[in-house]
Amino acid sequence: MPAAAGVTYMIEERRERIQAIMAQNDIGIDLGTTTIIIAQEGKGVVLNQPSVVAMDTRKNTVLEAGDKALAMVGRTPNYISAIFPLKDGVISDHTMTRELICRFVKQVYSSHMVKPRVAVCVPAAITGIESDAVVEAVVAAGARQVYLIDEPIAAALGSGIDITLPDGRMIIDIGGGTTDIAVLSLGGKVKATSVRVAGNHYDEEILKHVRNKYSIAIGQRTAEELKKHVACCPQKTDFHESMEIKGRSLLTGLPVRVTVSTDDLYEPVMMLSEQIGTAAHQVLEKTPPELAGDIFRNGVMLTGWINVSGTWYYANASGAMATGWLNIGGTWYYLDGSGAMVANSWRSLGGSWYWFGDSGAMATGWFLAGGSWYYASGSGAMATGWLSNGGTWYWLGGSGAMASNSWANVGGVWYWFDDSGAMATGWRQVGGAWYYFSGSGAMAHDAWVGDYYLQSSGAMATNAWVGSYYVGEDGKWIPGYGLVWYKNGSNVYHTHKCRTVGKDAKGYSQISIQEAQRRGASRECKNCQQIG
């Protein structure tokens, strides 16, 4: 091979390697009104965070973003403001959006050598000015190149649909701020529209409906929980759920509770659903007949959570029913072999027990099930045996149930656990008796602790003799109590004040009255009686 050809080959090989490395750094961003999702080449989804920023208005500084900022919503002092910089799928606060994107991109992209190429999903009806704002914000976050992709096309590609075919496909993408509707064919949009009706609007209408019907003010999170677990349309369905919610009475200003059912929420959710349906109908009216026929033949594929006769299932991006473990937005669920979501029940999986609550979410940390408290590790596996949490020891039996207000014998040693489940140490009163527990929690017995004696049962002795020692009503040893001078063979005993005997008297010993009487003494001597 000529030298020049070898150099050219090396240059081309190096260029291919560099291009391959750069391709690995490509990322995609779904810039949603409520959630920002970032995916990376070869890794899939690497970030899923709420589109919210917590800001200190006094210092004009950003405190937190994403999950940590969302946790502050409704729980912050006046000078901390929760900002949602994206509204209806577009940027409403350019500065905060840029801050949000910069923070999230830095979390998933650490290379300082090669800047990433970034593809961003945008609403189908986005304007030129809105597009420029998105590009500017992403470039400020460190992007080398920015590509804008219509959300309906991105949704179709994510669902595994081959949009390059001359075949009509209808996409309805319901997000947080907008619903994008498009008919696709040959890799492009034939007809499309975007309506400002989506998930957040359902939350707002549910909030208003509860306020008007029950005179109760609830928060955005409560409205979202009602939307996810109770709301449904149409009205004639086998799905009927209810949920107890807490809020503030608009009449009294006091906290109240009320149960909201599926039928209660039919009106607000159906009103918005009809708007989405009308927009889809308008798109179909403008679609060429051939493509409309394709849509009629292909049907509509459902994705996401689906309720069938009261049972929840999940269809993935390709429309296939999911089974096994499922992670959505950082929450784990388990779908059995039939696809049904496991809820409000235990499951033994891979040798460990897991609890899934009413919503189907896998429990972590402390949780209440069947009237007992349990603890699940970060992986969701139920803990058993000893557990140290927050510097406090707990005992979780073989069943995993936390011992509380009860005794437990562990390895032949008795322990007491109070109402909170915390292991007792030091002095504790149990059932009217006093017990002492060492630093390890082990119950003391058959031993003195200071001036107090613990019996074989562990209970502190009171008003009793312990050998030649006497303990009073409070359990404390009383020095010299009940001791007398006695000489073997005598029928009398002498108090310590008696002039007849003293400490140096020969033949006398100091014993308890009971012991002296056992040995034959029947009374005090006359001097003792006179001293009285």
Image: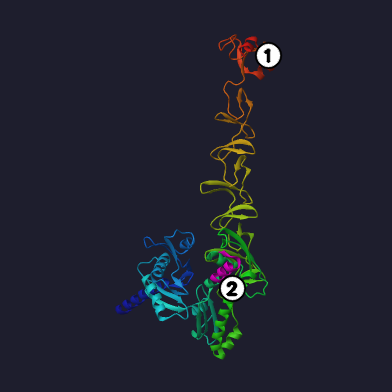
- Residue at the far left in the pictured view: 4
Question: What's the amino acid at mark 2?
Answer: Pro
72 up-or-down from 155: above or below: above
Instruction: Label 1: state its secondary structure.
Output: strand
Out of 461 and 338, give the one closest to the viewer. Answer: 461
- Residue at the far bottom in the pictured view: 289
- Residue 417 is labelled as none
Can the viewer see residue 326 in this picture?
no
Can the viewer see residue 107 in this picture?
yes
Write down the residue under mark 1: 523
Residue 171's quadrant in the figure?
bottom right
Q: Which region is colored magenta?
A: 203-217
Instruction: Label 2: state its secondary structure.
Output: helix
Image quadrant holding the N terminus, namely bottom left
Report, in whole angstroms, how far the alpha carbon at label 2 lies from the one at label 1: 95 Å
Magenta span main SS: helix
Q: Earlier in the sequence, mark 2 or mark 1?
A: 2
Write down the residue under mark 2: 268
Q: Within the magenta stretch, is there residue 100?
A: no
377 up-or-down from 143: above or below: above
Out of 163 and 343, give the one closest to the viewer. Answer: 343
Q: Is residue 4 left or right of residue 184?
A: left
